[in-house]
Amino acid sequence: MISTTLNPQPVNSSTIRPAIQSLQPQIVAWRRHIHQRPELAFRENLTAEFVSQKLTEWGIEHQTGIAKTGVVAVIKGEKILAATDAPAKVLAIRTDMDALPIQEENEVAYKSQHNGIMHACGHDGHTAIALATAYYLSCHRADFAGTVKIIFQPAEEGPGGAKPMIAAGVLQNPDVDAIIGLHLWNYLPLGTVGVRKGALMAATELFQCTIFGKGGHGAIPQQTIDSIVVSAQIINALQSIVARNINPLESAVLTVGELHAGTAHNVIADTAKFRGTVRYFNLEVGERIQQRLEQIISGVCQSHGAKYELEYIKCYPPVINDEKIVALVHSVAESVLETPLGIVPECQTMGGEDMSFFLQAVPGCYFFLGSANPEQNLAYPHHHPRFNFDETVLSTGVEIFVRCVEKFCN
């Protein structure tokens, strides 16, 4: 049986079915339980154990230990379709479980109990929504045909748990026809949905470069090759890539976020290191940026007589939504949302997500569920030590997932 001993404010919405509204207190309780026990990538042992415990309690078939800490639940519908010869459909729902290395500054009763670790991106809410969806579907198997796979993924924040889960076969046996997922989003007002076909989130790539010069006395620069001067010229020149080498109608970002060099005010450093990130939506743009980045580094170093080592790391590709599955999510969201703002169709971000690997493997849709409520001081950005969200949105996420299952599988 499901417990509803906690009593946060229930949802009062004519579009959310009573059976899901009644789960709201427990969804909040699950979210807060997970929030208090945040875990970093591939160490989500407590979270995975909690998920497995609940699935076992509800009699839901599932596997654990996938890609170290991943969990996959399988819920088979019992509805008989009129066209009995039609193949049963399989819809996957993906959620993420990991937290961030951030010290929480919120003073709430459910504050993180793990020093230096915090759910500062909403993954605790994602996991709670997925759990509630699993519970509801398991209690209402007669309402849908086919099969639903709910994927509880580790390590979204990095180095990435999607690829190893796919490699472990989570999209097979039975084969997944489509996949959906949501991200609570404090950049959108409470009760809105950001969804669009094509690119929703950007590719995430990293680069790190070491410049090798020739150190010496700060008062005798003619005997040196100043790695700091070389690095400074490179960093400035890199900004010309987006400004002058990329079509202005395309979107791209190149940011150098770290620069380390030198040990004293009067010593010219022989080495300097800098690191940065590249973001884009169009794969051709990404190839152009990588090419120009090394050309600039090589050219500036050659002009100064310096040498370099460059490591370029492709982390996550862009999140590209399938048009048909977007239409499904869009129609469902329209039927659920009551706010006049409703759907935000051109919502995009240069943030990255390894949901992109799932979307490369099968058609799908990733969307944002607005969770900001400035009136309650719940609008801090993601990855902020005071990030939090309006929990009334949790049951909205469950309703959207359940309707997507019913509409897709039936």
Image (cartoon, rainbow, N blue to C red):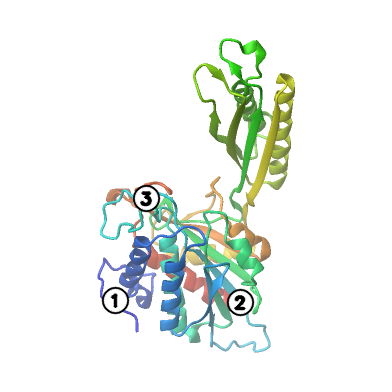
**As drawn, 66 above or below 227:** below
In this rendering, the answer to whether 409 lies above or below 127 is below
Graded by Cα atoms within 10 Å as few (under 14), some (14 to 19) or many (20 or more), the crowding at tag 1 reads some
Above or below, comparing residue 8 to residue 213 in the picture: below
Work out whether mark 1 precedes mark 2 in sequence or the reverse, and give the earlier one.
1
Query: Which class describes the residues within 10 Å of circle 3: few (<14), some (14-19), or many (20+)?
Result: many
User: Which quadrant of the view contains residue 128?
Assistant: bottom left
- In the figure, is residue 178 to the left or right of 187? right
Q: Are marks 1 and 2 in contact (CB under 8 Å)?
A: no
Q: What amino acid is labelled 1 in the image? A: Thr
Query: What residue is rendered at 60% in x and 10% in y?
Result: 220
Judging by the rendered image, the residue that carries numbered circle 3 is: 387
For label 2, the crowd category at 10 Å Cα-Cα, with few meaning under 14, some 14 to 19 and many 20 or more, is: many
Find residue 190 and report its image quarter: bottom left
- Work out whether residue 363 can be spotted: yes
Kindly identify the amino acid type of the residue bearing the numbered disc 3.
Phe
From the viewer's perspective, tell me whether residue 180 is left or right of residue 51. Answer: right
Q: Mark 2 points at which residue?
A: 90
| Lower position in the chain sequence, tag 3 or tag 1 | 1
Q: Position of residue 93 (x, y in %)?
A: 54, 69
Residue at the disc numbered 1: 4
Q: Can residue 246 be seen in this view?
A: no
Secondary structure found at label 2: strand
Q: Residue at x 73, y 21 (%)?
A: 305
